[in-house]
Every structure is written in C-alpha cells, then in structure tokens.
Image (cartoon, coloured by chain):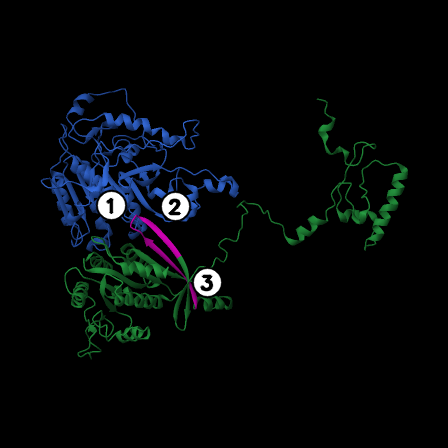
C-alpha cells in the first residue's frame, strides 16, 4: 500500500492544544494542515491521511463508467455521518434523489478483514506478491484508536444512509442544469462557505462541497469554457480561506484539450477513474484479481499545502473493487506471474501497454 | 452484436434507472447507418407487437426520411401497421420542420406533423404527449427512435439537444431510446457528447481502411467497392457493474437488407505461437534449402553410402593421393567442371582438425572421457 512519508520537523509546536479543539471527523495532518476523510479508508491512506481543509479535489470521469459516483457517495456520506454541512450540485433534475443512494456506515461488528484466505496451507507459503501482506498489521492498529467518532468509516454500499443523517442537517442540494450561467452556483457556494470561515482558533466543523459532472452537456453553460474556468478559480480561492473541501467531477472527453489541462492544473488533488473492459484476455493475463475489479483509479496529484516537498507515491494506479459487493476498496495492481510456457518474453508483458484501453498502468 | 443490442433495447429500463440508450454511428467510409437503424427499428417494433417487451408503444421521430417510407418499410417486413396503429406513432419532422407550408395533407392517423424543430422543449413535450396518447399515463412505458440526431443538431445547440435527450432518458415512462448519428458531419466534441449520453455505442467501420482517404486511386477503387458492401460493426456496452463490454461483427449489405455475421478472424491470430521478439526466427524457402545442404562434420554420414572424407589437415602422402583421387571423383560426379578449389570455395566447407590419427572415428564425441577424476 502506498503511504506518504510524513516529515516531522524538529520544531514541534504546541500540537496537543490544537488537536483537542478539532471537531468530529477532523484530524491533524502534516505541515499544520487539518485533514478530513474522503469516506474511503484506502484512499485516505494513499493520500497521506485524507483531504486537507482548504483544498480543491478534482476527479476526471470516464464517460463509460459511473465510478466517480462511488467516490462522491462515500465522500458525502462521510460528511453526513460527522454532521458536516454539505452542498451538492448536480445536473440531474432532482439532486435530492441522489441522497437516497448514499451508503450507510458499516457496523464495526462486521468482520471485513482482508486477511489471507482461510484455506491456505499451513506449511510453507510462497508469497508471490508479498507487499499485499504488509498492510494487515496496520489495519488492526487503526481500528483501535476509536473515540466517540471514527475519523473514517467503511461504507456499506448496499444499505442506504439512515434518514436522520440527511434531515435536519445543513444539506443543500440544487440542480445546475437550467441555470443560464454560473452566477447562481457561485452565489450558493459563497453563502455556504461564509458559514465556515477560517480563524486561528479551533475548528468546530468543516464543510463539504460536491459538484457532480460539472461540464455535463445538458447544462446551458457547458459551452462557456472561460466562465467555467473562472468559476473554478474563484471556488478554489474561496475554499482556500475557509474550513472546507470541495470536490468537482467532470468528464474530460467533453472539454477541449487546452481547457482540460487548465482544469487539471486548478486542482490541488487530482484523481481519475477509468472503466475496465469486460472479458479482456490480455488484461486478465497481466493482472491478478482481474475478475473482481470494476475500474481503475489513478492519482495524478496529491495536495501540497504549506510545503514545497512533493508527495511521491509508490504507485499511482489502483484497482477499484467491491469487497463482498459492499465495501469499496482500492488495491495496488499486482502483476500476474508470467506464464513461461506461452513463450512471451518478460520485456513485452512488463511494459504493460499490451491493452490500449488501459492507457498507462503504473506498478 | 446486433442481437444483443435489440435485446437490451427490448428489455428496457429497470425501476429507478436511466433508459438504455443506443447511438448508431457511421461515417462516409462505411455508410450503412440508415440500414442498421431500419433493422433495429423493425426488430424492436416486432418485439413490442409480440408483447415481449415491457414497452407498449413506439414513437418514431423522423427527420431525414418521410414517414411514408417507414410505413412501407414496416409493411415490407411483414408488420401490419394498420392493425397496429395503436402501438406506433410517427412524429413527422421531415415534411415541414420550420413551419413554412400553410397546409399539410394528413398522410395517416399514425403521423403527426411537427413544425417547430428549433425548439427542443416543444419537441420534448410533443414526444411525451404522443407517447402518453399511445400508451396512456401512469407507469406504462414506451420507446423512442430518433431518425437522425444530425438534423436536430442543425437547428438547435448541442446543449439543448443534450438536455432533450437526457430528459428523455430520465423520464419514468420511457423504456428505451435509440438514434442515428453520422459522425463525420460534426466536430469530435459533439460525437463525444452523444456517446456520453448513451449506454450503448454501435459504430460502423470499413473493413479495409483506405490509404490517405484518396478516392481517385485505382488501387483504392477495389477497396471502396468492397467497403460499399461490407463493413465492421463494433458495439461498446456500458454494463451496470461499471464494466465495458466490447463486441464486433461483420455486416453485409444485401438486396433483402442487412446481415450480421460473426467476425472472421482474418489475421487476428496469424502469428501462431512464435513469441514477439525483435529478430526474425523464421526461415525463408531458400534458407531452408541451403540449411538442408550443409554437410555436417560427422563421419558416419555420407551420400551414396560412401564414408565421407573430411579434410582434417593431417594426412600421409598415401592418404593425400587417395584423397585427391576421391576428390577428383567427387568433382567429376558433379555437374560443374570447375576446378577443385573453386568448387570447394563455392560449396562452403567445414574445416575439422582431428586431434590424433589413431582415434576411432567419432570417438572424440565425449570430451569428458579423458578427465581423470
């Protein structure tokens, strides 16, 4: 599993006082940042703890698969579980209906250990992909640090979120399909963020903004590319000076290439999801666990706040799997053992470019 | 494959889901889009009539062909439209799309003329109204076929067309939708938008790509002719579990209509089991013959049953005389009457120096024998 190495400087400030005044669902991160969870524990680990407050997360969708909705669902549910105010904008006619599909947190009694299968030999085990086994110890340790509220929950995608989390909350949903321009969206974001100013004191609660399929073609403003870009820039500025995290998903195939690049540069954290082709024999030979995968997640950029040190991940491509069809997990890609009898040389399979649909796979 | 598309459209949408949507995409290199559209239309309508589908009716929005064409088409396929006029209705956007004519003669009761194609929201309302008129209100569903989205995009902006289509998709009474698109009439972004909005994309491609798209070349003429009768049909399905299913077929244009056949693997698996390396492991014919002609330095070999004499660099006078005679014989048995040295040079020799004279022939095959362990 990839984890960012956090640097602890020799100047350790008064961290104890700051830590105690953080609201639920927040924790201290490196370089004086405060983190909140993305709702997917694996993603939190990859990004070094979670999303830092004041950052803009952008997710590049794949037009052929709805995996960005999984990310959004977990993100929004995590916020609601921690009673963090939420603003949700989507091009659908009835965005409130989406709230009905949010998953509920898994009960901690559920045994969802990802340990080795029980039917393994007791004798000599040859660990072909030994890195898989390192993470097991870490999992147990994290689970013990339980306060009243867990920092990050596993979400059960089969169970809908209980109603009381959604009602009586500061949850604001609206549709961006019919707005002729972005001024309405801008106003809503401004009012939302004005409730969460950043002061030097304690942070009682942090907010979340989720904008889905921002440049969807059915929106009236979708051909106003410069306006959309300046909206993103102003949102980024507003979020930076408030205690919130904004996540925007967009389909890059519907933007012109230059704007797609500009949008990617705007992001503090940039992720992308990709669809997997069904019955792809080449991919099945190349990767283990191909049958369980539903898609790929690529981490292109990780937020660097208050630091010039870049975050270098061990791997940037992860496979998205649904464990027991309920829990979203991200796994490192593991190359399957090369079949010596087939005669393919190691060089050709190692370059991982055998299937053009997957693009760049990075082990 | 064409069958699976028709099955998916026939089955329609589940509760709470967006309607399955098909884009049929073709281009000038492989212009069978209209025929594929007709095929899918007749298949879907027969399933609706046979009651195999939860959809109870079909609304056909015709832009690029006259409604009478479709009525004829369905009649030719054996579907009696007169008795089934409660199941299909055609929205005629072909005869008078912009409302220029004062008077339109009613073709039949199954056709309604629509005159305001610039206004997508009015088109949306008409479609829904007609659909409700066919199947009633409530939860009963109907399907929609749009003749060609290109005409819609001529009159209205991309975002309004996209809004119409996505609203149709999310309407609770709509079971499935499909439309035709000629991809070379639009910018790439427009095609990307329509693919984004659909759950199945069927594209027609030529079986042989023309070099540089030049159509005047004589060589390409045969290819063009071939492409006008045959093509490849690729389908990308977006499945519910988030995976993409890709299928391919061959498509043939015939008198009776269009035929889909499984892909013949011409050149798909022609490399055999030879691994892909950068040097050539195969032998050409000439190389194979030459290889068979190389004389190997084993003394048991010999043509004509005679033991082969191999020059070993050390020979007594007697032997050399003997050898020369043998060599001369060898030369004379050959067709060429060139000198010995020349023929030697031409033949290609293996020079073998034997270690000692009193060794038995081929006794030095195991060099480990003289190890003293």
Percent from the top left, x then y, of residue A247? 22, 41
In the structure shown, which secondary structural element does the residue marked by tag 1 occupy?
helix
In this structure image, what is the colour of chain B?
A: green
Q: Secondary structure at mark 3?
A: loop
In the displayed orientation, state which residue is furthest to the left.
Answer: A168
Residue B334 marker: none
The image position of residue A169, as x and y in percent, is 11, 39
Q: Which residue is mark 2?
A: A359
User: Of the residues tagged 2 and 3, which is closer to the observer?
Assistant: 2
Residue A243: x, y in percent?
17, 34
Q: Is there a contact, CB below 8 Å, between mark 1 and mark 2? A: no
Image marks 2 and 3: residues in contact by CB distance under 8 Å? no
- Name the secondary structure under disc 2: loop
Instruction: Give the letter of the chain under mark 3.
Output: B
Question: What shade has chain A been given?
Answer: blue
Left or right of B279? Residue B203 is left
Q: Is residue A199 left or right of residue B3?
A: left
Q: Chain of mark 1?
A: A
Residue in front for this viewpoint, A333 or B187: A333
* Residue wearing tag 1: A69
- Labels 1, 2: front one: 1
> In the picture shown, does residue A298 fall above or below A32?
below
Q: Residues within 10 Å of mark 3 (few under 14, many from 20)?
A: some
Mark 2 is surrounded, within 10 Å at the Cα level, by few (under 14), some (14 to 19) or many (20 or more) other residues, namely few
Q: Residue sitting at 18 percent across and 39 percent down? A: A208
Look at the image and give the residue range highlighted in magenta: B229-247
- Residue A43 can be seen, yes or no: yes
Distance Cα–Cα, label 1 vs label 2: 22 Å
Residue position marked by numbered label 3 in the rendering: B210
Q: Which numbered mark, 1 or 3, is in the foreground of this view?
A: 1
- Distance of label 1 from label 3 (alpha carbons): 41 Å
């Amino acid at each position: 599993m990839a984890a960012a190495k956090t640097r602890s400087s020799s100047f350790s400030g008064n961290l104890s006082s700051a830590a105690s005044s953080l609201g639920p669902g927040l924790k201290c991160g490196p370089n004086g940042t405060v983190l909140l969870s993305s709702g997917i524990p694996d993603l939190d680990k990859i990004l070094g703890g979670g999303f830092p407050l004041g950052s803009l997360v952008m997710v590049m969708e794949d037009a052929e698969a709805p995996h960005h909705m999984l990310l959004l669902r977990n993100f929004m549910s995590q916020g609601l579980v921690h009673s963090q105010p939420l603003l949700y904008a989507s091009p659908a006619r009835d965005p409130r209906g989406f709230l009905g599909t949010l998953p509920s947190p898994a009960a901690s009694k559920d045994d969802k250990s990802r340990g080795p299968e029980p039917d393994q030999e007791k004798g000599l085990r040859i660990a072909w992909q030994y890195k898989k086994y390192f993470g097991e110890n870490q999992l147990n340790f994290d689970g013990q640090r339980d306060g009243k509220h867990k920092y990050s929950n596993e979400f059960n995608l089969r169970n809908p979120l209980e109603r009381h989390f959604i009602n009586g909350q500061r949850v604001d949903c609206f549709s961006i399909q019919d707005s002729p321009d972005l001024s309405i969206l801008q106003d809503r974001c401004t009012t939302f963020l004005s409730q969460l100013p950043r002061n030097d004191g304690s942070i009682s609660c942090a907010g979340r903004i989720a904008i889905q399929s921002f440049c969807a073609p059915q929106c009236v403003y979708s051909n106003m590319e410069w306006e959309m870009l300046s909206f993103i820039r102003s949102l980024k500025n507003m979020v930076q000076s408030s205690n919130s995290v904004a996540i925007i998903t967009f389909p890059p195939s519907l933007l012109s290439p230059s704007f797609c690049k500009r949008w990617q540069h705007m992001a503090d954290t940039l992720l992308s999801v990709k669809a997997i082709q069904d019955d792809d024999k080449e991919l099945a030979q190349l990767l283990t666990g191909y049958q369980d995968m539903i898609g790929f997640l690529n981490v292109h950029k990780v937020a660097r706040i208050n630091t010039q040190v870049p975050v270098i991940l061990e791997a940037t491509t992860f496979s998205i799997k649904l464990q027991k069809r309920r829990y979203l997990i991200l796994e490192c890609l593991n190359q399957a053992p090369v079949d010596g009898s087939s005669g393919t040389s190691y060089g050709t399979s190692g370059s991982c470019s055998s299937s053009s649909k997957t693009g760049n796979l990075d082990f | 494959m064409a069958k699976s598309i028709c099955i998916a459209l026939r089955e329609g949408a589940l509760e709470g889901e967006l309607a399955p949507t098909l884009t049929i995409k073709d281009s000038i290199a492989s212009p069978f889009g209209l025929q594929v559209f007709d095929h899918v239309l007749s298949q879907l309508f027969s399933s609706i009539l046979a009651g195999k589908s939860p959809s109870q009716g079909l609304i056909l929005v015709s832009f690029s062909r006259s409604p009478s064409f479709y009525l004829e088409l369905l009649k030719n396929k054996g579907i009696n439209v007169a008795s089934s006029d409660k199941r299909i209705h055609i929205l005629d956007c072909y005869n008078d799309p912009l409302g220029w004519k004062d008077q339109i003669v009613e073709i039949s009761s199954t056709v309604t003329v629509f005159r305001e194609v610039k206004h997508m929201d009015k088109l949306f309302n008409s479609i829904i109204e007609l659909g409700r008129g066919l199947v009633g209100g409530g939860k009963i569903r109907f399907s929609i076929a749009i003749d060609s989205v290109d005409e819609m995009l001529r009159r209205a902006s991309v975002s309004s067309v996209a809004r119409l289509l996505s609203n149709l998709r999310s309407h609770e009474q709509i079971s499935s939708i499909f439309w035709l698109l000629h991809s070379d009439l639009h910018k790439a972004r427009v095609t990307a938008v329509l693919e984004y909005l659909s759950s199945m994309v069927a594209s027609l491609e030529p079986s042989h790509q023309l070099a540089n798209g030049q159509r005047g070349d004589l060589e390409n003429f045969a290819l063009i002719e071939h492409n006008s009768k045959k093509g490849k049909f690729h389908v990308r399905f977006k499945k519910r579990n988030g995976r993409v299913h890709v299928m391919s077929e061959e498509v043939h244009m015939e008198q009776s209509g269009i035929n889909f056949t499984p892909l013949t693997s011409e050149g798909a698996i022609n490399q055999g089991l030879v691994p892909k390396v950068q040097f050539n492991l195969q032998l050409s014919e000439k190389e194979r013959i030459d290889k068979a002609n190389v004389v190997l330095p084993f003394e048991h070999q010999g043509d004509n049953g005679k033991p082969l004499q191999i020059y070993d660099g050390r020979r007594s006078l007697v032997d050399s005389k003997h050898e020369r005679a043998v060599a001369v014989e060898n030369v004379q048995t050959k067709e060429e009457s060139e000198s010995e040295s020349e023929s030697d040079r031409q033949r290609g020799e293996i020079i073998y120096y034997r270690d000692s004279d009193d060794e038995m022939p081929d006794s030095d095959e195991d060099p480990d024998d003289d190890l003293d362990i």
